Image: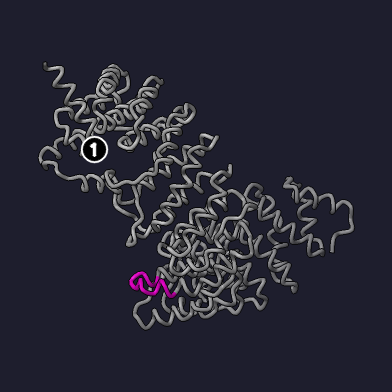
Amino acid sequence: MVPTSPEKKQLLSKMIGGADLPTSDVVELLASHDTLCKKLTCCHIADKCHSNNDLALLTANLLLRDASDANPTIRSASISALAALPGIEESAVRVLTSALSDQAAMVRRCGALGCVKLFDHAPEAILECGLTDALYDGLRDSDPIVITNCILALDHILQAEGGIVVNKNIAHYLLSRIMQFSECNAVYVLTILLRYSPKSEEELILLLNALDELLLSRAPAVLVAVVKLFLHWTQDHPHLKKDMLEMIQPSVCKILSRNVSETSYLLLDFLSTLGDICKVFGPHYKYFLVRAKDPGYLKTQKLKVLPLISTEDNVCCLMEEVKPFCSDYQSFRGAVSCMGLLAKVSHAAHNMCLSMLVTLLDAPAERVVIAALECLMNVVLSPPSVEKNISESPPDPVLSQSSSLGNVEVQNQTTLEESLSQLSLHTEEPKPELKALPMPQNELELPQNLTDAIVRALSHEHVQEAAPSLVLYVLGTLAPYLDSAPDILQRISSLAFSPSVHADLVTAAAQIFISRPAQTQLLLAAILARAFKCVGEPASRAALIYATLQEHPSDAAFLLGATVKQSFRSNNEECQEQQLGGSD
């Protein structure tokens, strides 16, 4: 009942606002017979007692009296305040010991949390009086909230020893009561159970059987917690993971169908850590599709998960669903990246992605063009493979490409690789992450309309200024397929770059020279000469290394990752004719 006195109402308003009240006013409010007034006053005392010694001394007797009140609400509030008062630790220990065995569950809950308050300012009082044993006994309480509070208190008090010790009896007992806990408390208990490991196969089976009902939970937090516990206990039995995924699949789809952004994000973020989930969730891909009204963070997370559930049966449908979001302001980068990953699933998706890239490379917004160029390099250097799973971590593409080129003497290769390892190329914008085995460039099949779109994108001035390192990377890598690569390089070389980007310019020039020596010879010489005069160390170091590599052209091709396409033999012949003409 709210106090009728206007003076008390005014004092309570100040108290709730955090103001410091005179000690006499606090004592007057504490002596009130109103339950709500007592609860608010006890909270104020617990908050202010450490900065006001008189407050603790003058209210201790009243609190001790109220700790024996017939009303469990008043007892609970008084016990919480007593546990926080300094200087009366002995009385607080007696009150807390009695509270942990009180008939009212509310009082037992406050008694467990009161142990935490007392430990914070008088840890020796808790450790010497045996309250930890009483808290361990509280783990078998009939009230699940009391159990949770006792676990919380023990974990806090025993933090120096590694927290609460979970033995076999405690683990089995908590799992037998887990369905009685609230969602929040169940998550906490499941997290604590991660500290226990089954001692035998028979015990493991018993514990996993106890998790079956939780694996069907429709609460996202509980589902995530129980899956973590399942994976922890079965880390030596990976074959059980598929059975677990099949059990949680209906619950996951049900949660996603609610269209609650926060819970969907939590669940999708966790699913992205589970590895190979495409066989179980692939047939149910419609629950994972991006919606136009999804918030930006959820769109991004869904686009990360879609490649993980892609199969040869659904990948084309996923590509069609992702396509509209490639021009979305919030999610265009994630959508284009997702499309590149989907292209690795099958040859049909690969060809479909290339046709979509033609449109994206001609987009009016340079940010979309840049994202499309990054996707292009992932797609053309990472062809689809039936045996490949995109959820796994494939070998490094540069090393893989080097091994596929071959035909280089090992001794020369080692020497030149040591030279190249000293080159540090730091770009101003991120380069595309190539995470798959690349196809040798002499086997690439780029449609003519795609190469034309690439040339137009690379020739765009705003793209060159926004992502110079990416443009140079694409230009050098795809030089055998771009007839106008030397012309684009010449236009880019006239721009002002930082030393790190200038080093990328030297690399691109050397790569283009490998494929088109006749057209690039003079330009390469000019770029190298300019790099030698560059103030920054990366550019001059790159120029020195590539100038040295000119003495070993086959090794240079190997280390630069560039191969000469057979259809461009005319470039070599033209270069030889020029050399013969010069000697004459």
Residue receiving disc 1: 564
Image vertical order of residue 253 relative to residue 169, above or below: above
Q: Quadrant of the C terminus?
A: top left
Q: Can residue 65 be found in the magenta stretch? A: no
What SS does tag 1 mark? loop
583 or 343, nearer to the observer: 583
555 or 515, nearer to the observer: 515
Image vertical order of residue 187 relative to residue 561, above or below: below
Q: Position of residue 578 (x, y in %)?
A: 18, 21
Q: Position of residue 575 (x, y in %)?
A: 20, 26
Quick check: 470 left or right of 547? right
Q: Quadrant of residue 81?
A: bottom right
Question: How many discs appear?
Answer: 1
Image vertical order of residue 14 relative to residue 266, above or below: above
Q: Position of residue 533 (x, y in %)?
A: 28, 16
- Can residue 112 be seen here? The reply is no
Q: Can residue 235 be found in the magenta stretch? A: yes
Q: Quadrant of residue 141?
A: bottom right
What's under tag 1, amino acid-wise?
Val
What residue span does the magenta drawing correspond to? 233-243
Crowdedness near tag 1: few (<14), some (14–19) or many (≥20) residues, C-alpha within 10 Å = many
Quick check: 184 left or right of 273? right
